Amino acid sequence: MEKLIITAAICGAEVTKEHNPAVPYTVKEIGDEAQRAYNAGASIIHLHVREDNGKSTQSIERFRECIDEIKSRCPNVIIQPSTGGAVGMSNEERLQPIYLNPEMATLDCGTCNFGGDDIFVNSENTIKEFAIKMKQIDIKPEIEVFDKGMIDTAIRLFKKGYINDNMHFNFVMGVNGGINASCRDLLFLKESIPYNATFTVAGIGRYEFEMAALSTLLGGHVRVGFEDNVYISKGILAKSNGQLVEKAVEISKVLGREVASCDEARKILKLKG
Ligand code: KMH
Ligand code: ZN
């Protein structure tokens, strides 16, 4: 089986220091957490950024500072900024980090409820706009899937030329409003993507590690990190993103799958490098 790519979603837009004091806000904290994740075995950093007080932002300047900080510590790591941002942001705000020309960025392929009163809005035209811009500057989209119809949307847009071939998906499983984090549903998602596509799985909350194990077994890749889950085990907060990545690495060892380096991840995902 192909080597395992581990993505660390180190910060997110919604999780706070009230959930876990180790959630990073400042540029230095983001650099520290990225470095811990990288040292533990992550080859991709999925990046949201914050103001020093923890407020989510898509400011291009803040992204530039954080990316420079991460690159100064782990020069080879793949940085994948979010274009999802936080619920309620405008498209223009959300798109800011792509103008820094990263190797990858997320492309959210549908609207879904996001717990409580929140709705994460991605209309057909929004998805097209983001896809066109990312294609123009040659950024590989990671297609974010919160429900099965989002795969169908991505494939439809691929057929119309908005998205390039060799698509890469992230199945986000267990959001309140999205698809369940279950083995049956993961098989359904896996069987719904094109034969030459790659996928990773982000299990939300307590599902993080069981979904990581299932994806590792099924030939997918794995995403862990504070964005998705702040616990290392039931009731015990993780000390760092590094600790969460270490656990994903342990799972991969038990299941006999080697972990990919950054350059190996670039090859598997066919990144421009
Ligand atoms: N924060 C969520 C509303 C992405 O990074 O593209 C959206 C999100 C997805 O995190
Ligand atoms: Zn995200």
Image (cartoon, rainbow, N blue to C red):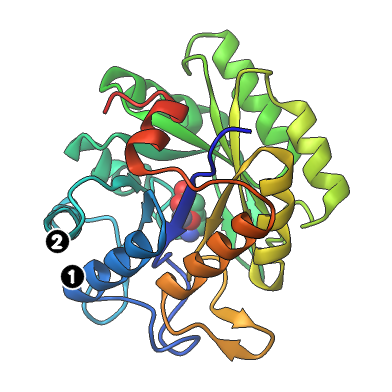
> Which residue lies most toward the right here?
184
Q: As shown in the figure, which amino acid type bears the numbered disc 1?
A: Val
Q: Tell which circle, 1 or 2, labels the residue nearer the N-terminal end.
A: 1
- Is residue 186 depicted above or below 198 in this figure? below
Residue drawn 44% across and 58% down? 8
Q: Position of residue 152 (x, y in %)?
A: 70, 26
In which image quadrant can residue 88 be found? bottom left
Residue drawn 82% across and 39% down? 187
**Depth check: 138 or 210 in front?**
210
- Is residue 258 depicted above or below 49 in this figure? above
The image quadrant where one finds the C terminus is top left
Q: Position of residue 135 (x, y in %)?
A: 35, 20
Q: Secondary structure at mark 2?
A: helix
Q: Contact, CB < 8 Å: mark 1 with mark 2?
A: yes
**Depth check: 101 or 199 in front?**
199
- The residue that label 2 is drawn on is 69
- The residue that label 1 is drawn on is 27
Q: Position of residue 249 (x, y in %)?
A: 54, 60
Q: Secondary structure at mark 1?
A: helix
> In the displayed structure, does residue 32 sit left or right of residue 88?
left
**Depth check: 3 or 130 in front?**
3
Say if residue 230 shows up in the picture: yes
Rounded to the nearest whole Å, what is the CA distance between mark 1 and mark 2? 7 Å
Q: As shown in the figure, which amino acid type bears the numbered disc 2?
A: Glu
Can you tell which mark lies on residue 187? none
> In the displayed structure, does residue 246 sit left or right of residue 200?
left
